[in-house]
């Protein structure tokens, strides 16, 4: 099937197997957007301020149901929306067809299997997806993202990254968990956040920033959340040497 990611060597990380069972469940995905509570407008405005226009190609890695990809599509020439979940891609394709969006390409793949075609991307966006990869594979993924972009192209990244110190983990994480939602239908519960801490792969910001630089990015701006559990980066691909 054309939607299947390419076969990988046996030693490579299985992104689909580690995506989280909820991302493969059509019933969960039906309520995913309400639970996430994501408004794409600030990110759309940020990209336009960074120079995105109707000549631009943007790749959205870990696109989910495509809330951002669909919102940014009217301002681009080409949007490639990539996710490992067949259910997410099916939901996005249905919505794009319903809305008559013709410049959006849904692709079932991951950070480690997406094969970019055509001219290098001008922009890459990733929100709350990279934490599914352990740090070794995260670094490999960042290097692959750099190769997708033209020199000077922009990578906008937001995810669950830890900016607290090694000695403040208990305090910071308990503070974050204490603000969890009591209702699973409207937000992330303590149980869900505990599962993330225990089983997924959030990285300390000081490690992630070194990975970004080693991958060939220049960090232009960084933002750390008050809870010290989220961070956002605006990066550009360094010029080729």
Image (tube, grey):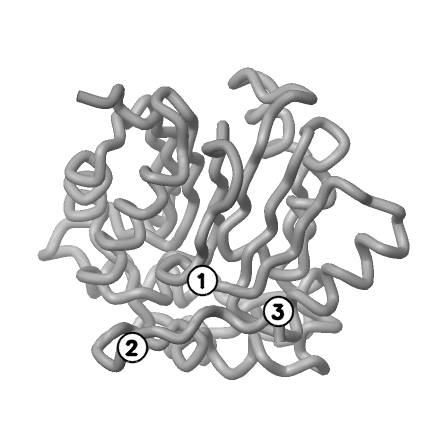
- Residue drawn at x 59%, y 21% is 52
Q: Earlier in the sequence, mark 2 or mark 3?
A: 3
Q: Which mark is residue 207?
A: none
Residue 7, position in %: x, y?
40, 75
**Residue 155 placement, left or right of 79:** left
The answer to whether residue 127 is above or below residue 90 is: above
Q: Which residue, given by chain and number where applicable, does mark 3 sit on?
A: 2
> Alpha carbon of mark 3 to alpha carbon of mark 1: how far?
14 Å
- Residue drawn at x 55%, y 16% is 51
Residue 106, position in %: x, y?
65, 56
Residue 28, position in %: x, y?
67, 78
Q: Nearer the viewer, residue 199 or 101?
A: 101
Q: Nearer the viewer, residue 44 or 34?
A: 44
- Residue drawn at x 53%, y 38% is 118
Q: Which residue, given by chain and number where applicable, does mark 1 sit on?
A: 110
Q: Earlier in the sequence, mark 3 or mark 1?
A: 3
User: Which quadrant holds residue 4?
Assistant: bottom right
The answer to whether residue 66 is above or below residue 85 is: above
> Alpha carbon of mark 1 to alpha carbon of mark 2: how far?
22 Å
**Residue 38 placement, left or right of 126:** right
> Alpha carbon of mark 2 to alpha carbon of mark 3: how far?
35 Å
Q: Residues at badges 3 and 1 in contact (C-beta under 8 Å)? A: no
Q: Which residue, given by chain and number where applicable, does mark 2 sit on?
A: 198
| Other-residue count near label 1 (Cα within 10 Å), few / some / many at <14 / 14–19 / ≥20 | many
Query: Which one is in front in this view, the residue at disc 3 or the one at disc 1?
Result: 3
Q: Quadrant of the N terminus?
A: bottom right
Query: Which one is in front in this view, the residue at disc 2 or the one at disc 3?
Result: 3
Q: Nearer the viewer, residue 107 or 51?
A: 107
């Amino acid at each position: 099937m054309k939607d299947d990611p390419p076969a990988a060597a046996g030693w490579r990380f299985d992104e689909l197997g580690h995506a989280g069972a909820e991302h493969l469940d059509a019933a969960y995905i039906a309520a995913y957007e309400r639970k996430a509570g994501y408004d794409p407008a600030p990110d759309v405005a940020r990209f336009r301020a960074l120079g995105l226009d109707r000549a631009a190609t943007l790749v959205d890695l870990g696109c989910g149901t495509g809330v951002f990809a669909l919102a940014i599509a009217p301002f681009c020439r080409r949007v490639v929306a990539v996710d490992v979940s067949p259910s997410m891609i099916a939901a996005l394709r249905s919505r794009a067809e319903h809305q008559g969006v013709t410049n959006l390409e849904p692709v079932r793949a991951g950070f480690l299997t997406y094969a970019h075609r055509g001219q290098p991307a001008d922009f890459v966006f990733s929100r709350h997806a990279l934490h599914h990869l352990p740090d070794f594979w995260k670094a490999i993924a960042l290097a692959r993202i750099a190769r997708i972009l033209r020199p000077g192209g922009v990578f906008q990244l937001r995810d669950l990254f830890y900016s607290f110190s090694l000695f403040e983990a208990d305090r910071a994480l308990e503070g974050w968990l204490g603000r969890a939602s009591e209702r699973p239908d409207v937000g992330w519960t303590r149980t869900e956040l505990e599962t993330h801490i225990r089983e997924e792969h959030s990285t300390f910001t000081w490690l992630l920033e070194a990975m970004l630089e080693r991958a060939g990015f220049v960090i232009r701006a960084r933002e750390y959340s008050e809870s010290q559990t989220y961070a956002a980066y605006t990066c550009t691909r360094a010029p080729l040497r």
